[in-house]
Image (cartoon, rainbow, N blue to C red):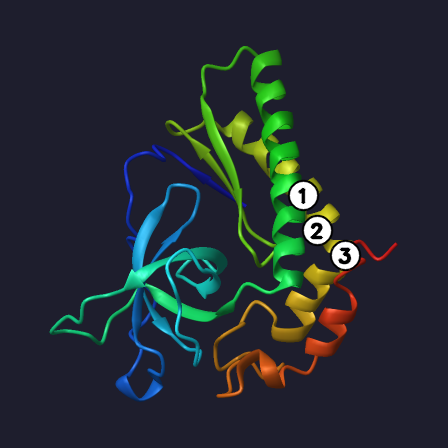
């Protein structure tokens, strides 16, 4: 869980992850829009796909695993060793189902937090509640910094959110398949290899679970 004061102040990714070497590049550099603020960044394409404009993709940023939308190829820069993250794959059906589920839970958290602020006659302004695709991160975007009492309430809402997400089979696959290290060398499911998700050890299980995300 994160609380983000002055959420309108930044429209770009301020803290890119470590540079990606030339040897790791396979599909070129793309511009993509990510996050509820519409931040635009430069992303290395780790897939063999030729990505078209408005293509929904899964990316790894400094914040974690997120959903993004491709805007087009990025112009090469002289220092081309830096990027704002990596494009891991195109959004699959199971990714879309999980993303809709997370967004629904985030809307519930937004409403609950808004109700609490109103009941306590707080002057704090909640702008948005933003989930990441990893199912473990929830950003509460406030117009300004919040006090300790509001922070405590946000922490409680985040805990409820995590409990709901933990019941999802897709969230379990994210954790125990590719895991929080999806797209990195620490990933154990195969996604850090050249085969990507095509060789992921839980890819078949993920596809089988597409019609039943809550395990009912």
Mark 1 burial class by Cα count in 10 Å: few <14, some 14-19, many 20+: many
Q: Secondary structure at mark 3?
A: loop
Q: Secondary structure at mark 1?
A: helix
Q: Quadrant of residue 81?
A: bottom left
Drawn side of residue 136 relative to residue 5, left or right: right
**Numbered label attached to residue 213:** 3
Q: Quadrant of the C terminus?
A: bottom right
Which of the two discs, 1 and 3, sits closer to the camera?
A: 3
Mark 2 burial class by Cα count in 10 Å: few <14, some 14-19, many 20+: many
Q: Quadrant of residue 205?
A: bottom right
Mark 2 lies on residue: 165
Q: Distance between the Cα atoms at labels 2 and 1?
A: 6 Å
Q: Distance between the Cα atoms at labels 2 and 3?
A: 10 Å
Residue occupying image coordinates x 71% and y 61% = 170
Mark 1 lies on residue: 161
Q: Position of residue 138 (x, y in %)?
A: 55, 45
Q: Position of residue 79 (x, y in %)?
A: 14, 73
């Amino acid at each position: 869980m994160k609380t983000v004061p002055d959420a309108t102040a930044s429209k770009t990714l301020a803290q890119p992850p470590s540079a990606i070497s030339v040897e790791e590049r396979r599909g070129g550099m793309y511009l993509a829009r990510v996050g509820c603020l519409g931040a635009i960044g430069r992303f290395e394409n780790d897939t063999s796909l030729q990505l078209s404009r408005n293509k929904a993709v899964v990316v790894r940023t400094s914040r974690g695993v997120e959903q993004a939308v491709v805007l087009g190829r990025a112009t090469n820069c002289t220092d081309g060793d830096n990027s704002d993250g990596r494009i891991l794959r195109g959004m699959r059906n199971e990714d879309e189902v999980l993303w809709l589920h997370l967004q629904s839970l985030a809307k519930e958290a937004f409403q609950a937090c808004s109700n609490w602020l109103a009941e306590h006659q707080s002057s704090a302004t909640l702008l948005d509640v933003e989930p990441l695709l990893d199912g473990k991160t929830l950003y509460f975007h406030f117009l300004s910094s919040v006090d300790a009492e509001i922070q405590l309430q946000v922490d409680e809402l985040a805990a409820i959110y995590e409990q709901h997400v933990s019941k999802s089979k897709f969230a379990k696959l994210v954790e125990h398949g590719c895991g929080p290290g999806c797209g990195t060398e620490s990933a154990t499911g195969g996604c850090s290899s050249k085969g990507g998700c095509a060789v992921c050890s839980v890819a078949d299980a993920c596809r089988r679970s597409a019609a039943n995300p809550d395990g009912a």
